Structure formats: C-alpha cells, structure tokens
Amino acid sequence: MMPFLRVLCLLALLAAAGCGRSSPLAGQYEATYGDGGRNRTIVLDLREGGQGAWTAEDESITFKWDVRGDEVLLHTRAGGVIRAVAGNGELTADLPGAGRLVFRRAGK
C-alpha cells in the first residue's frame, strides 16, 4: 500500500506543478474587422492557467484554452472549438460571419 501512496503523491505534485506553468502565448490580442465601413475590435485575452475571454463591443464570452503544436484551441461553454494558428506573435482564426481574423498582441 505504501508504494501506491507514494506514486499517488508524486502524480499529484506533478499535476500541481503543471497547472502553474505559464505559456508564451498567454496575453491580450486584438483583431479589427469591418462591415459596411464600420470597424470593430475584438479582444482575445488568454490568461495563465488556460482561462480566457473574448470581448467584442459590449459582449464578453469566457472559454478555456490550450495549445497543441502551433494551434491554440478555444473551448467554448457550448462545446464548440475555435482553432487559431500561432505564428510570428499573431493568432489567425477563421470565424463564421467575420471571416479570417488576425489577432496581434495588444500594444504592439
């Protein structure tokens, strides 16, 4: 029984250490798109720990995110997944109704 408890404790410590890891992709990104001559800005906030938010005008949607290879996967509460490709400090995503958006780090 003791070896089992040691292994269990070791796994718990490894899981806790993994949760605190930071991602180089964490941060705030902005994309601008227009329809009918009116530009709109979407803010994508990728927080540490895999939590995030998507804000467009007065609406904000929370999600969980993770990285797989060069893709950032945004998991919505409704069960959908939005894929964004990371490269050169940008995230590129194809969104229904908005088309291809390029998110750049805020302040750059």
Image: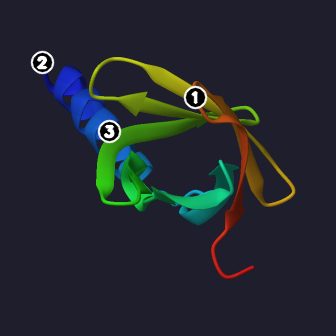
The span from disc 3 to disc 2 (Cα, nearest Å) is 15 Å
Q: Upstream in the sequence, badge 3 or badge 2?
A: 2
**Mark carried by residue 1:** 2
Residue shown at 41% from the left, 47% from the top: 50
Residue shown at 65% from the left, 48% from the top: 36
Q: Are marks 1 and 2 in contact (CB under 8 Å)?
A: no
Give the side of residue 26 with respect to residue 25, left or right. left
Nearest to viewer (mark 3 / mark 2): 3
The span from disc 3 to disc 1 (Cα, nearest Å) is 47 Å
Q: Upstream in the sequence, badge 3 or badge 1?
A: 3
Q: Amino acid at mark 1?
A: Gly
Residue shown at 23% from the left, 38% from the top: 9
Q: Amino acid at mark 2?
A: Met
**Mark carried by residue 10:** 3
Residue shown at 28% from the left, 21% from the top: 78
**Image height of 62 relative to 8, above or below:** below
Q: Residues within 10 Å of mark 1 (few under 14, many from 20)?
A: few
**Image height of 55 relative to 86, above or below:** below
**Image height of 105 relative to 46, above or below:** below
* Image x and y of residue 25, in percent: 63, 57
